[in-house]
């Protein structure tokens, strides 16, 4: 599975990238707004830290505007930047054109397997189903991942990757791994939680305590 970080905070990206496991970064207008910085400047800096796919989202709502913005972003930003497009009819049309241009895309705000399949047919490099937002409605967001992976199994020619998004806790990540999702994007907090385990901490404390006694005996 690819591990993506969902943030526009470059300090968080540097932290997780230093672990050696970061495959890409997703951003959106809300995350960029939270950073309080210029959009293109932030994305360019992120792309310089992580050499994997960096999602930069268009803000136009019409097909022509999305295509124009997507092409402008690709021209102005590093090669590893991919264009994030909403799953709307206009977005699918823009995805088709940008894909034919040779531009990688991430179709976002997916809430059904049908939407995911249509985005794949339009040529999306990634589709982003939103797990947590479905959970917020009282339904199980993981059922969406299961539905999409079952659909992909029926059509082995599909090369579009399933990028699980709106991840709220480590169990979401584990379930995505078990269901075979290709990618998960998550906040830095989830990365830290995935790494944390009390038995690891306890074992390390025991090792260090024993080693201190070995050193003490050696210096006696």
Image (cartoon, rainbow, N blue to C red):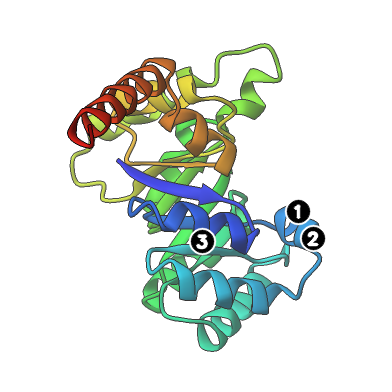
Q: With respect to residue 5, does 44 lie above or below?
A: below
Nearer mark to the viewer, of 1 and 3: 3
Quadrant location of the C terminus? top left
Q: Which residue is mark 2?
A: 33
Residue found at x 52% / y 30%: 112
Q: Is residue 18 visible?
A: yes
Q: With respect to residue 118, does 65 lie above or below?
A: below
Residue 61 at x, y percent in the picture? 73, 62
> Quick one: label 1, few (<14), some, or many (20+) residues within 10 Å?
few
Disc 3, SS:
helix
In space, the residues marked 2 and 3 are separated at their CA atoms by 19 Å
Q: Which mark is residue 187?
A: none
Q: Which residue is mark 3?
A: 14
Residue 164 at x, y percent in the picture? 46, 37
Disc 2, SS:
helix
> Quick one: label 2, few (<14), some, or many (20+) residues within 10 Å?
few
Residue found at x 58% / y 79%: 73
Disc 1, SS:
helix
Contact, mark 2 vs mark 1 (Cβ under 8 Å): yes
Q: Which residue is mark 1?
A: 30
In space, the residues marked 1 and 3 are separated at their CA atoms by 20 Å
Front-lying residue, 12 or 121: 12
């Amino acid at each position: 599975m690819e591990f993506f970080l969902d943030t526009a905070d470059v300090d968080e990206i540097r932290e997780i990238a230093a672990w050696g496991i970061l495959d890409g970064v997703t951003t959106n207008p809300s995350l960029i707004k939270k950073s309080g910085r210029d959009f293109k400047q932030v994305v360019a800096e992120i792309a310089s830290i992580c050499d994997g796919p960096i999602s930069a989202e268009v803000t136009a709502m019409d097909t022509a505007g999305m295509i124009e913005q997507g092409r402008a972003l690709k021209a102005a930003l590093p090669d590893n930047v991919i264009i994030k497009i909403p799953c709307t009819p206009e977005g699918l049309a823009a995805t088709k054109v940008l894909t034919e241009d040779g531009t990688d895309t991430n179709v976002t705000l997916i809430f059904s397997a049908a939407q995911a399949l249509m985005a794949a047919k339009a040529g999306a490099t990634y589709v982003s189903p939103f797990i947590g937002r479905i959970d917020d409605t009282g339904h199980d967001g993981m059922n969406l991942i299961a539905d999409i992976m079952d659909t992909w199994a029926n059509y082995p020619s599909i090369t579009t990757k399933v990028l699980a998004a709106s991840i709220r806790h480590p169990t979401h990540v584990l379930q995505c791994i078990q269901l075979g999702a290709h990618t998960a994007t998550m906040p830095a907090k989830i990365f830290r939680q995935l790494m944390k385990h009390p038995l690891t901490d306890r074992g390390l404390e025991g090792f260090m305590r024993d080693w201190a006694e070995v050193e003490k005996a050696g210096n006696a």
